[in-house]
Image (cartoon, rainbow, N blue to C red):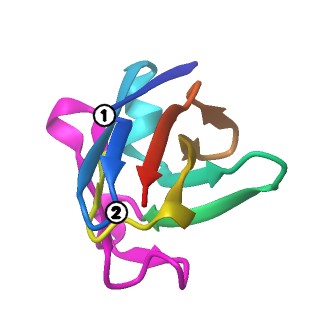
Amino acid sequence: QVQLEESGGGLVQAGGSLRLSCAASGDTFTFRNSVVGWYRQAPGRQRDLVAVINTMDTGGTAHYADAAKGRFTISRDNANNTAYLEMNSLKPDDTAVYYCASLGRQQYWGQGTQVTVSS
């Protein structure tokens, strides 16, 4: 099994930046060979995809939801079994719990990290 732990959330003013980390443990081979995604869920709303990054042996390409394009960057460091989400120009609408997921044949999810953007 893959265990995922997110970190890096917090309270930031609008226009600020945060860098979220997703550290994998356990079956790190599966993590390194799976698509990794970042999702977010605001209170009373469904969980939405923010960004995904492919495996490195398929090019490590990234794809973003429209709300994240131009402001967020997803990356992964397989040597350290970690994925990242760099978030810039944050807006109050970005306030949510952010989750990372390993999206292989079996999905694994972290517990989430709270991001709060004040106006």
- Is residue 76 highlighted in magenta? yes
- Residue 102 in the image: above or below residue 61: above
Looking at the image, which residue is at 47% across and 77% down? 64
List the residue tagged with mark 2: 14
Say which amino acid is labelled 2. Ala
**Quarter of the picture holding the N terminus:** top right
Mark closest to the chain's N terminus, 2 or 1: 1
User: Residue 66 sits in which quadrant?
Assistant: bottom right
Q: CA distance from mark 2 to mark 1?
A: 16 Å
Q: Nearer the viewer, residue 37 or 1?
A: 37
User: Pointer 2: residues within 10 angstroms few (<14), some, or many (20+)?
Assistant: some
SS for callout 1? loop
Looking at the image, the residue that sits furthest to the front is: 119
| Residue 17 percent location from the top left of the image | 23, 57
SS for callout 2? loop
- Residue 81 in the image: above or below residue 117: above
Q: Nearer the viewer, residue 55 or 68?
A: 68
Q: Which mark is residue 8?
A: 1
Q: Which mark is residue 84?
A: none
Looking at the image, the residue that sits furthest to the top is: 26
| Residue 98 percent location from the top left of the image | 53, 44
- Residue 102 in the image: above or below residue 94: above
Magenta span covers which residues?
54-83
Say which amino acid is labelled 1. Gly
User: Pointer 1: residues within 10 angstroms few (<14), some, or many (20+)?
Assistant: some
